[in-house]
Amino acid sequence: MSLPDRIRVLLEEGLSYPSVADRLGISPGLAFLLATGRPVDDGTSGTTEGLCRSPTPSASPRELSPQELIGAGASVPERHSEILEWVAARAARELTSPHA
Amino acid sequence: MPERRLITSWPLLRQLRGEDPSGRGAAVRSAGTDAIRARTVEADRVVKSVCPYCAVGCAQNVFVKDGRVVQVEGDPDAPHSRGRLCPKGSATLQLTTGSAREQYVLYRRPYGSDWERLDLETAMDMVADRIVDSRRRGWEWEVDSVRTRRCMSIAALGGATLDNEENYLIKKLLTALGVIQVENQARVCHSSTVVGLGTSFGRGASSTLPADLQHSDLIVLEGSNMAEAHPVAFQWVMEAKARGATVVHVDPHYSRTSALADVFVPIRAGSDIAFLGGIINYVIANELDFREYVLAYTNAPTIVGEEFQDVGADGVFSGFDPETGAYDPSSWQYEGAFVAAASGQRDQEGNLAPLDSERSANASEGGRGDPTLDLTLTHPRCVWQILKRHYAEYTPEMVERTCGIPQDLFLTVCRLFVENSGRERTAAFVHGVGWTQHTIGSQYIRAASILQLLLGNMGRPGGGVMAMRGHASIQGSSDIPTLFDTLPGYIPMPHAHAHGDLDAFVSGDAAKRGFWGNMRAYMVSLLKAWYGATATAENDFCFDYLPRLTGSHSTYDTVMEQLAGRIEGYLLLGQNPAVGSANSRMQRFGMANCKWLVVRDFSLIESATWWKDGPEIASGEMRTEDIETEVFFFPAAAHTEKEGTFTNTQRMVQWHEKAIDPAADRRSDLWFIYHLGRRLRERLAGSADAADRPLLDLTWDYPLASGTNEPSAEAVLAEINGWNADGEMLSSYTELAADGSTASGCWIYCGAYADGVNQTARRTPGSEQNWTGSQWAWAWPANRRILYNRASADPEGRPWSERKALVWWDAAEGRWVGHDTPDFEADKPPSYRPPEGATGPAAIAGTDPFIMQADGRGWLYAPAGVGDGPLPVHYEPQDSPLPNRLHRRQRNPARQLYPHPNNRYHPDPGTPGSEVFPFAVTTYRLTEHFTAGGMSRWTPYLAELQPEFFCEVSPELAGERGLEHGGWATLVSARGVIEARVMVTDRMTPLRLGDRIVHTIGLPYHWGPNGYARGDSMNELSSMALDPSSHIQEVKALTVDIQPGRRPRGPARLALVQEYRTRAGITETTGMAR
């Protein structure tokens, strides 16, 4: 019987993950991973069980981390006008439009 | 009442009255504990950053309070790292805030015995003065009447730990100065990958991302100890395993990767091509390839010219010149066609000679011809048949006697490959420098590439070749290269020709078909970025400003130039060759022959202090007071003290924000190179010397922040991205023009600043997108996460398998759609066939997934680009305990050798003296240390975890040599002698190869004599012997003797090496045979 199957059997018998791990000589985290296919801290990657042409399934909601509670950085960067102005000045000085 | 509170706070009362009857928890919680808050909660702000250690590029959150960094943790939003950090990443706080970092500029005057403090601005002025002086003395306009326009008296090394923006300005400035000897860690790490993958598929970078390994049915890790060298990325291997994938680890050394694998295959170091060739033979001989894929997407049907001769018993291909030790690859070409490589050796035709007229005709308009295909795969000169004949002798028996792998184990791996490839299943290779760091390293990668093409694993989910690179931005320092042989975006540096204009350069090197067909646009846009308005069509866009190469100018060639007294100045920018490069002794002697040396780093690494306390001082070979070399040490800013981008191993470009300003004299390398350039331009302003025009005409006016006048990294990134004449940021390299109307510092990064937004700073959490994580940061090219993904669909555009769907053709929408950005023109249908005479991208058919290749196909056979042959051949390493059992050519006949009294090679196996160095050595990383140790040996947490240099030996070898576990051992080669603690372990497997037992000693390579964790450098033992295409050294397989006890000190150390050389009969010609 494969290790994941042995884990599932023991879980169905009512053992906890630490007890299963103890019984099988592995770590509780590994027992959880092999049983569920997910890391124990429920990593945030939206992994897909199987690749197919249907739309990517959306991930399940997760709890906010403490870091988010104090305001982590935005996911969408802002435009910086000073950079764009600098670019515009250089383009005007250095490049010739093909339509000129 | 205070008395009442005092009584009720009494632990016993709390135990009796509260919810902690055991009295071990809340009842005994003190007021002091109550007052403690997590630093993450108390912080004023958090900035988004990236780990500065390896190339997994784990995302970090950096917490700042009261202007100080107080905590660094993993960012759980990151799709690739999911909040994890390994011990190194977890030690980032200590790395960046610890007391081991220097704060002030230090100066060693010529012949000085100690450091002095020096004002930062004065130091900058002094360095600028020395560059001006040395450059004048080392200036060269031509060689043998051929224009070179370069400075040969200054060299630079580093850096793969620097930001892309820093490497960009370093290359830009040094090239404008005419300095061509510019290198970084990429040379000594994964340069073979660039050649191997680039010639096979069109791009020399990892084809996939670690997170995609979760979709693999088989993962073969070879030349990699991923669990220990890239721990956070290894989580994806475990995910795959949890889903039922099989994991195989092939390695000379049993490690934590092996412990988590399903199958461990011990292999003799340096024999992987024989192993991979054996699998290739198994697939071909048993017709177990993915035939439809092979026919449609590889050059298997292509007919090769009749001049080509495969290796025979003499072990060389046609075109080999034993006098020069080099190949003329012209006989390897296709019949009736001339194709240029997308990577590797390019633009070397006619080096120092006029372009051959016949070759010019081949290279000119319409002269390249069309390859002829035989779809029956029966023509004797088609690639398929050549491949079949070439690998016919790589039998299981040959694998066993060459690699030491029992036949049944070898066949198990073969079956696993075949059973997990094809339409419905995919297999991935993961490799590291165990493959690249060989005198035949590029061909290791080629062999894996051939196998993946035969099995149809390229461009498919769970497939590909995952090259695990080692530094935070070593991918970036290859892409935007501080490397001698490329310009940004893998445009080759021009070689000296008699007709060295832009037209000749483009026509001589650019493929006519595929996206390299637009090389002129990429090149002109680069020159416009660098030279602005000065670069016009009338002056060839300042193409003539570029210095020219005349051969190899790698870091190892630079060392030879130093020893010859031709290098006056050397800039080390976050790299430590005194212990980190092969033959570290020669590195130090080289530096001792320089007039001046600049070292930028966090701490006083060995490359900064060799003149004071290096091994040659201890041995008496050098005396501090006799060493003229003037040394400037500049303390570098940490990644938390600057903003910019790192490019990780999956080509993902991540912006890291600045958390705090650097203190004291610490500055970013961006600041350093910008202000150095400013000073140089001021000093040479008004010069009438034509040699100074490139520097004076350089665009060098970036916005500066107030305070330290730090240049804007974001502005530099914008320049790298590029813009058009209307000042609009470009979104794609397809917008680049050859008429001077666009500027772009690196065409493959075009899109990183699309729409005027820093795409590399995007941080959409992994939970809100699919596994490719395409909304997190930005990946080149064009944010495609899995390269060649057109190959995940059949020629009609349907996924080969629904289980492995990645991108597919949506006829209704008239475009390619799917889970990833298509690595293909989005609206080009599968049915598209190029019209007669089509060039560039228009010549790529709707069925050609390898769009950078001249023929649109994956190359099983490489007609160009790889200097030692179109097909991988097993050769023994430079140092080997065994003769080559395949053919009479012992070693790679085209390898680069450096005869020198300090670089002697070992005798051929089986010859007198070979028994003096009977044991093999292989090297590897430890999780807790980082490369040459500059960022770990000074970090107490990491130094404490791995405090001492050690060697791993099998119980059998320990018994044979009287080595005791925990004791000391002395290891000797013809180059040097070191000592290490002994670890007796069955992790090292003695291998039986025929009648011989080969023992291998394992050596981690992180040590040097400085820092908290001190020890000898493994590179005292290694030699300079290089792969001819990548110029990488061989440090994964060498030979030594090992004896119990500590090594001698002082002059006796050298005497021991000399004694060994005498016993082995080593002369200046030993080991040099071609």
Image (cartoon, rainbow, N blue to C red):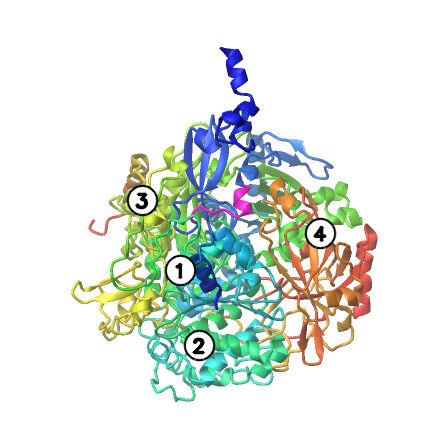
Residue B585 or A71: which is nearer the viewer? Answer: A71
Question: In the rendered structure, which amino acid carries the disc numbered 4?
Answer: Asp
Q: Are marks 3 and 4 on the same chain?
A: no
Q: Which residue does the numbered mark 4 point to in the structure image?
A: B1016
What is the chain identity of the residue bearing mark 4?
B
Q: Magenta stretch containing residue B9, yes or no?
A: no
Mark 2 or 4: in front is: 2
* Crowd around label 2: few <14 · some 14–19 · many ≥20 (10 Å): many
- C-alpha span from label 4 to label 1: 39 Å
Callout 3 secondary element: helix
State the mark number for residue B212.
1
Mark 3 or 2: in front is: 2
Q: Which residue does the numbered mark 2 point to in the structure image?
A: B418
- Residue B566 shows in this picture: no
**Left or right of residue B724: residue B55:** right
Q: Magenta segment range?
A: B82-91
Residue at position x 42%, y 76% in the image = B454
Q: Are marks 1 and 2 on the same chain?
A: yes
What is the chain identity of the residue bearing mark 1?
B
The disc, 4 or 1, on the residue closer to the chain's N-terminal end is 1
| B733 to B600, vertically: above or below | below
Question: In the rendered structure, which amino acid carries the disc numbered 3?
Answer: Glu
The disc, 1 or 2, on the residue closer to the chain's N-terminal end is 1
For the view shown, which residue lies furthest in the top direction?
B1
Q: Are marks 4 and 1 on the same chain?
A: yes
For the view shown, which residue lies furthest in the front direction?
B16
Q: Are marks 2 and 4 on the same chain?
A: yes
- Residue B429 shows in this picture: yes
What is the chain identity of the residue bearing mark 2?
B
Question: In the rendered structure, which amino acid carries the disc numbered 1?
Answer: Asp
Q: Which residue does the numbered mark 3 point to in the structure image?
A: A94
| B944 to B447, vertically: above or below | above
